[in-house]
Image (tube, rainbow, N blue to C red):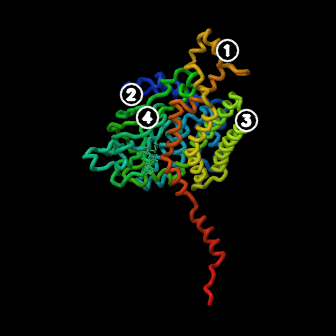
Amino acid sequence: MLLTGDEFLESLRDGRKVYVGGERVDDVTAHPAFRNAARSFASIYDKKRAPENRDVMTVDEDGDTYSAYYLLPKSREDLHKRFETHRRIASWTYGLLGRSPDNFPSYVSGLVMDPPMFDRIRQGFGANVTNYYKHMRKNDVFVSHTVTNPQGWRMADPVAMKGRTPATLRVVAEDDRGVTVNGLKMLGTATVFCHETWCGNLQPVAPDQIKESITCAVPLNAPGVSIWARKPYERHAVSEFDNPLAARFDESDAAVLFENVHVPWERVFCHDNVEMTRAIYMRTPGHAMANHQANVRFLEKLKLIVGIASKVAEMNGARNVPAVQFTLGRLAAMQATLEGLLMGQINSGEDFGEFHTVNRRYVYAALHWCTNNHSEICDTVRELMGAGVFQMPADASVLADPKLRETFETYWSVPGQTAESRMKLLNLAWDLLGSDFAGRHMQYEKFYAGPGFVMNSYSFLTGPWKEWGDRVDELLASYDAPKPRN
Ligand SMILES: Cc1cc2nc3c(=O)[nH]c(=O)nc-3n(C[C@H](O)[C@H](O)[C@H](O)COP(=O)(O)OP(=O)(O)OC[C@H]3O[C@@H](n4cnc5c(N)ncnc54)[C@H](O)[C@@H]3O)c2cc1C
C-alpha cells in the first residue's frame, strides 16, 4: 500500500498525546508548531507515488506495491535503486528531514535479513521481526527510533540514586500477552509525525540494567505514551520569507514517555539480553543500511550548502576573486569526496547470506566524514556571507509597506539585484547556517548517529586489521637483521 499525502495527514489525527511545553496539542496537522512540517512529510508520500517517480520509488511484490526503501537488495542494481529512492526523498526536502520515512525502514530491512539471530535471543522473535517488517511495508508505516536513554541516568551512581528507580525505559512487568514498560526514551526525531516508535538501545547497556534491554515497537497513540516536543522553530518562524526552512522543514525532536504501556509479545524483538539489544544492529546490515540513507540525505543537504556558498559569493561580487574561488573549489572537492564515498558503498557492496548490501566500512567512513566536517563547512560559508544578513531590515513587513519598500529598494539594491532578492537569499542562507533552526542542525549532524568518539569506534571495529598487519609482517619478513659477527 502507498498512502497518499492526505491519508498520511489523516492518520496522524489519532488521539496521540503531544505536549509543547504545558500545552496539549490536539491535532499536529493543524497546530502552528507542526502543520507545515506535517505537509512536508505528506508531500513525500504524494511524490513517491506520482507517475514520474513511481518506477524508481516503488516495488511490486506478492500482488502489492511497496515503497522501494523496503527492497531487500540482492544485487548492485538493487542498491542503486535504494540509493536513488533515498536521494529523491532527500532532494525533495533538501536533506533537511533527517528522519524521513525512508530512514527506519532501512534499519528494519537490514534486521529482517537474519531472523534466526532474533530466535536465538528468544524463540519467536525472528517471526516478530519478519512480521513487523511486513506490517511496516504493507501499511506504509512511518516509524521513528528512540534508541537512546536520557542523559544523567546512564551509569547513574547508585549512592546518589538513593533507591530511586532510574527514569529510563524498562520492563516493569510481563505476562502471557506481553510486557509492560515504563520510562523515558530519547530522542525521537520526527516522532510527532510518526505512527509508531521503535524503542531500543544503540548504546551499551550495563549487565545490572537488564530490564532496559527491551527492544519493541509501540504505536504513538497507545495508552500511556506521550510525546514531549522540544521548542518548535516552525511556530517561531516569522514568515516563510523570513525563515524559509524553519517554516517548512522543522522535523521536531521529542522525548517520548511511556507510563506503564503494555506491548504485546508480537512487537517485542529483544528482552532480557544486554548484549543483543545493541548487537542486533551491528550483526545485521541494519545499522549500515540506515546510515547509508543518512549519508545520502547529507549529500543532498551539502549540495544546498555549497549552492548557497556560490550564490552568496556571487551576490557580494566576490565570486571571481581567486581567494574566494579557492574556497569554493575546496567545498566542491568536499562534496565530490562524499559522493564518491557513497558510490563506493554501492559499487563495493557486501554479501550477507542471500543479500547484497552496502559496504559497511565506506558507510562508517562517510559517517565519520559528515560528522567531523559539517560544522567546518557551515563556518566556511558563514565567512563568505560577511555581515550581509544583518544589513537587512528586521523582517519581511518592510516589503508590505509601499513607501518603506521603495526606500529599501533605493538604498539596499545593487546593480542587477533587487533589495528583495538579496534579502530573500540571505534569509535562506541564515536559516540554513545561523538561525535557531540552523543551530539545531549543527547539533543534529554532530549527534544523530551517536557521539563523535563512536564514529571512530565504528571504523576501528570494521577495519581489516589482520590484512594490514599481514602486510607489515610480509615486509618485515623480506629482510633480515644483521647476523652477529663471528
Ligand atoms: C538533534 C538531535 C536528534 C537526535 N535524534 C535521535 C533519534 O532520532 N533517535 C535517537 O535514539 N537518538 C537521537 N539523538 C540522540 C543521540 O543519539 C545522542 O545525542 C547521542 O547518542 C549522544 O548522547 P547524548 O546526547 O546523551 O550525549 P552524552 O553521551 O551525554 O555525551 C555528551 C558529550 O560527552 C562526551 N562523552 C560522553 N561519554 C564519553 C566517553 N565515554 N568518552 C568520550 N567522550 C564521552 C560525548 O562525546 C559528548 O560530546 C539525537 C540527538 C540530537 C542532538
In whole angstroms, how far apart are the C-alphas of marks 1 and 3? 27 Å
Sequence-first disc among 2 and 4? 2
Mark in front: 3 vs 2: 3
Q: Nearer the viewer, residue 148 or 481?
A: 481
* 116 up-or-down from 183: above or below: below
Sequence-first disc among 2 and 1? 2
Q: Position of residue 173 (x, y in %)?
A: 30, 44
Cβ–Cβ below 8 Å for labels 3 and 2?
no
Q: Is residue 178 visible?
A: no
Report the amino acid beneath label 2: Gly
Report the amino acid beneath label 3: Val
In whole angstroms, how far apart are the C-alphas of marks 2 and 4? 11 Å
Q: Nearer the viewer, residue 348 or 63?
A: 348
Q: Position of residue 401 (x, y in %)?
A: 59, 10
Report the amino acid beneath label 4: Ala
Mark 3 element type: loop
- Crowd band around label 4 with a 10 angstrom C-alpha radius: few (<14), some (14–19), many (20+): many
Which residue in the structure is indicated by mark 1?
A: 410
Mark in front: 1 vs 4: 1
